Amino acid sequence: MNLQPEDDAPALPAGESDQTASREQIAERLHFLFRQTGNNPPAIELEQQIMTYRLTERPQ
Amino acid sequence: MNSLPLEAITADLVIKHINHLPRPSGIVSELLRCLDDQNATAGELAKVIVRDQAMVARLLRIANSPFYGLRGRVESIPNAIAVLGQRAVLGLATASAFCGAFETVAAGDFNIQIYSRHSLASALCSRGLARRMGISEGSAFVAGLLHDIGLLMFASAFPGHMAAVASYRQEHGCARHEAELAVAGMDHGQIGGILGKRWYFPAAICDAIANHHRPDEVDCSELACAVHLGDALAHAMDLANDPQEAVPKISERCWRKADLAWRDSQEIFAEVEQEFAVLSQALLN
């Protein structure tokens, strides 16, 4: 887990507000979350999976 | 800040400072014994839980929440075990015992709310993965719940190291556990493994805690793989309310071992979000 300040984080509130967030806001937050994974293939796949979930699969 | 180099953290140093953390209650030890003992009965588990009436109240509140579809019908712990299952109740009881047990830990920027939310999310993600990997869901839930317990030690006993880790991360832009290794010679997983052994946690749980950030450096168990991946999923799901949340690199070996189909991952995300809402409300508020 990450408990120290680093740089400016995108402002999408965690978890609760995807339904009102735009696709760009969701993508920006996910890009921020995966900023330390580099070219790690499982992380790339996981980012795609969670992006799909956020945009299409999430129960309303 | 003191400019002298920091002392490397060793197993002996962790043991020397172990009293900085509250020792888990006797009930926790008995719950973990029930987890480790394949022959433990539902009656034995119920006897342990009913000794803590606050825990009983929390568990009944959870069992009667709409999420489990049993609203108002679970009136006792034996009843909860009968309808939810022994392992599920064991996991919930352990979560109930641990959430709040370390509220007094405070140092620098350490945030116990973020810690607790991430631990609960990791427990649920690890359990979802374990179900699909065909390994013990109960052990995965508890190991996920406790995987970052070493962070509490960093915060309470080694605040100088914690501050140095933060500075190192600022400078190098690396993951927390990498900075811990560079600064202290040991990461929070390894420290947690030492604490778990000292507190007589089951060996498989200690192994998973110790190796959740280095599954490729040791011949780690499937449980450790599940917790390594559960931790990553929990970070990716962004449930901890941590503005500086970051997903760590993921072991390709563990990822292949889990072999998650696309549909599996979507189901895990949905399950975890729904149950997290129920449990965080009941246990963390």
Image: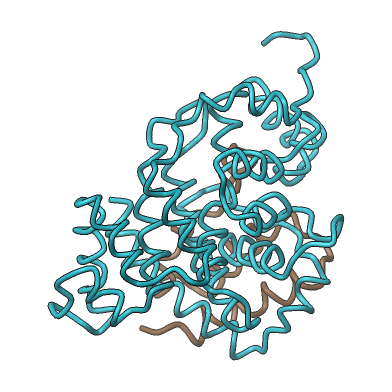
Chain colours: A brown, B cyan
Q: Quadrant of residue B199?
A: top right
Residue at 37 percent across and 48 percent down: it is: B27
Where residue A9 appears, x then y in whole percent?
A: 57, 49
Q: Quadrant of residue A41?
A: bottom right
In this picture, residue B203 sits left or right of residue B42: right
| B141 up-or-down from B185: above or below | below
Residue at 40 percent across and 84 percent down: it is: A59
In this picture, residue B36 sits left or right of residue B13: left
Residue at 78 percent across and 33 percent down: it is: B171
Q: Nearer the viewer, residue B217 or B180?
A: B217
Q: Nearer the viewer, residue B251 or B199?
A: B199
- Is residue A41 visible in the rendered structure shown here? yes
Quadrant containing the N terminus of chain B in the rendered view = top right
Where residue B223 appears, x then y in whole percent?
A: 67, 67
- Is residue A9 visible in the rendered structure shown here? no
Badge count = 0
Where residue B258 appears, x then y in whole percent?
A: 71, 79
| A3 up-or-down from A57: above or below | above
| B258 up-or-down from B99: above or below | below
Q: Quadrant of residue B92?
A: bottom left
| B90 up-or-down from B269: above or below | above
In this picture, residue A12 sits left or right of residue B163: left
Q: Nearer the viewer, residue B40 or B170?
A: B40
Where residue B134 appears, x then y in whole percent?
A: 63, 83
